[in-house]
Image (tube, rainbow, N blue to C red):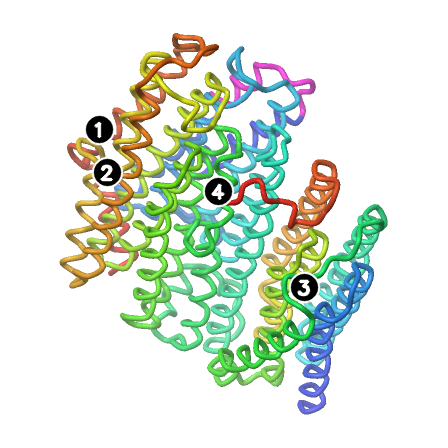
Amino acid sequence: MDTLFAQLVVLESSLALLFGLGMLWRRGVPAYISAFLWQSLVLAAVAATVGYFGRERELYLVAALLVVVKALAIPWLLRDMERRFASERELAPYVNTATSLVLAGLLVLFAYAIMRPVVAASQLPTRTGLPLAMGLVLVSLFVVMSRKKALTQVVGFLMLENGIALLAILGTYGIPLIVELGVFLDALMGFLVMQIFVYRIHETFDTIDVDQLDRLRH
Amino acid sequence: MNAFTLLLVPSLASALLALLVRPYRRVVGWVNGVLSLVAVGGAIDLWARVLSGEVPVAGDLLRADALSALLALCVSGVAALAAWLGPGVGADDDYDPAQARTFRIFANLFAATMLFAVTTDNVGFMWVAIEATTITSAMLIPLHASRASVEASWKYILIGSVGIALAFAGTVIAYFDFVSLAGRDRLALNWTVLRDAAPALNPQVMQLAFVFILVGYGTKAGLAPMHTWLPDAHSEAPAALSAMMSGVLLAVAMYAVVRWQAVAQVTIGPGFAEDFIVLLGLLSLAIGALSLWSQRNYKRLLAYSSIEHTGLICIGLALGPLGVFAAMLHLLNHSVAKSMMFLLAGRVLHRYRTAEIGGVSGLLRVMPWTGGLFAAGMLAVIGLPPFGMFVSEFALVRAGFAAGRPVVIGLVLALLAIGFVGVIAHLNRMLYGPVPTGVAVGEGSGWALVPLACCAVFLMVLGLTVPAPIDGLLVRIAEIVAP
C-alpha cells in the first residue's frame, strides 16, 4: 500500500515539476496558461492522493479548492487577459531556451542537495517527492526573474505558489486548514491585484513588456 | 472586549466608514483621525500591561509580549500621523475626493494588517497578514497614476509577493520540522509552541527554513540584495503612504525575522543564523550608504537611507542581548524619524512641485518651519546627537565590541561615515541658496507641523535619555529574543 502511495506521489510530483519546466521551452502565453492549469490539476490530485492514503479528510477540501481557484477561476481570468493582449509580439526572454534548460536542471539538482536533511528527517511515504517540490519552487523563481512579459511573470509566480503548496502537502500532509484558507484568500487577492496592475501597465505603457519599465532605473 | 479590541478595531472601522460614505466627505478623514488615536490608546494600554508583567492573550490567536507591544506602538503611531496628515483632511492637498476615499480605505486596511501581523501568535497568520500588507499598500502607490508610479507598484507587488512566498516556503519547512518531531498539531504554527519545541527540532532542517524566512521577509524589509523595489515604491508613493511603508512596514517585516530568529537560534545554536544576518545587514548598509551619494531625488535619498538603517537593525539582532536592545531602540527611532521625514518631504514636494534635489533650494527661506524640521530630521537620520539614532547607534557599536565582532563594527562605522557625508552635501544644497522663481514663500496649513514637531521633540528626548517605560520594554524584548 505504502509503495503504491509513494510511487503515485512521486509520479504526480514529477508531472507538476514537468509542467513547470514546460514554461522554459514552450512559447506563448496560451501554452503557459494551459501548463499552469494542468499543474494545478496535478496538484489537486496530489492533495486527493495524500488525503486518501494518509486519511486526512481536510485535504479533500484543499483539493476541491485547488480545482476551483487554480484550475478554473485563475486560468479563466488569465485567458481573458491574454485575449486582450493577443496582438503583442512574443518576446525573447533574458536567457535563451537552451541555457534556461541547463540552468533549470542545475536548480533541480541543487534542490536535491538542499533537501537532503529534510528528506532524512521525515518518515512519511511522501518524502521522496519533496526535492521535486523544491525544484519546482526554484525553477518558478527562475522563470519570474528571467521573463520580460508581465503576464508571464504572473504565471511564474502562480507556479511558485503551487510549488510551495506541493511542499506543504508532501512534507506535512497540509498545514492547518484555517491557515490554509487564509493562504488561499491571499493568493486569490494577490492575483486579482496583479491583474489590475497588468491592465494598468497596458494602459499607461501600451505594452505589457516590462522591459519598457525603465523610468526608475538607477 | 479584550486587550486587543481597541488596537485592532479602529482601523477596520475607519476602512469600512470610508468604503460606505460615497462620495468622500472630509468628515471621514476627521473620524479616521480620531479612531487612529483610539488605536494608539490601545497600543499604550498593551504597553502598560506588558510592563506590569502581563502577557495579554486572546484565545490561541492573539498574543502580545514586549516585542508585539513595541511594534503595535510604532504602527499605530505612524498610522495616526498618516491619518491626520494624509489626503482628504486639509483643504489644500493635491487629491480629489475619489483618491482620498481610496487612500482612506486601503491605508486603514494596510494599518489593520500590520497590527494583526504583530499581535498574532500564529506564524501562519503572521505570514498571511504580511502578504496582505503587500496587496493593500500596492493599491495606493499609483494614487496619482503616472508611468513611474505604475512601474514602481508593479516592481513592488511582484518582488514583494515572490519574497513573501519564499518566506512561506520557509514557514512550511519549519512546520515540517515540528511535525516530523511531534506529529500534526493544530497549534504547531503558534510561535509559543514552536519556541518551546525549538531545542528538540532538527537543526539542519531549521537552517534551511531560516534561510528561506530571512530572504523572504528580508525582501519586504528592504534588505540587500532584494531591496530593488524599495527606492521606487517609497519615492513614488503618496507621502503619507511612504511614511507608513518606510516607518513601519519595514519594521513589521523585521519583526517577522526577529520572531523566527528567536526560534531558529535555539534550534541551530550560535553561529549560522547570526552570521547570515550580519552578512545581509552589512550588504544592505553598504548599498544604502553608497547609494546616498548618487541620489538626485530627495525621496529616493530617504528610501536608500531606510535600506541603510534596516541593515543596521539587522546587524544589531546578531549581537546578543545588548545588540537586540540597540536594534529595537534603533527600530523605534527609525519609525519616528522616517515617517516624519517622508511627511515633510511631501510638504516640500507639494510646494516645489519637484522631487529633484537640484530643483529645491532656499528651503529655509520658503518654509522656515518645514525646512528647519527637515534639517533636524536629516541630522537625526544620519545619527548626529542630540537625536535618538546617535544613542542607538552608539549602543550598537558597544554591543558589537561586547560580542567580540570588532571587524563588523569597524565596517559599520566606516559605512555610516560614508552615508553621513553623502547626505550632508545634499542637505546643504536644499536648505540654502536662492528661492526658485514661481515658488511661493510662507508656510501653508501650519497646524500640520505640530505632530511633526512632536516627532522631532520625541527624537530629541530619545537622544538625551531612554525613558524608563521604553527601557523596560526593550529589556524585555532582549530577554525574549536573546535569552
Asked whether residue B55 appears in the rendered view, the answer is no
The verdict on residue A98 being magenta is no
> At 33% from the left edge and 38% from the top edge, which residue is drawn?
B334
Q: Secondary structure at mark 2?
A: loop
Discs 4 and 2 carry the same chain letter: yes
For disc 2, the marked residue is B383
For disc 1, the marked residue is B460
Judge by depth and name the residue closer to the eye, B69 or B407: B407
For disc 4, the marked residue is B114
For disc 3, the marked residue is A159
Q: Which residues are magenta?
A: B20-35
Chain at tag 1: B
Where does the image place residue B311, in percent across and percent down from the top left?
A: 34, 51
Comes first in the chain, label 2 or label 1: 2
Disc 4 residue type? Met
Disc 3 residue type? Met
Comes first in the chain, label 4 or label 2: 4
Count residues near mark 4 (Cα–Cα under 10 Å), then give few for <14, some for 14-19, many for 20+.
Answer: many
Left or right? Give the position of B385 relative to A173: left
Disc 1 residue type? Met
Judge by depth and name the residue closer to the eye, B5 or A13: A13
In this rendering, the label closer to the viewer, 2 or 3: 2
User: Could you give the CA–CA distance between mark 3 and mark 1, rounded to whole angstroms?
Assistant: 49 Å
Left or right? Give the position of A161 relative to A67: left
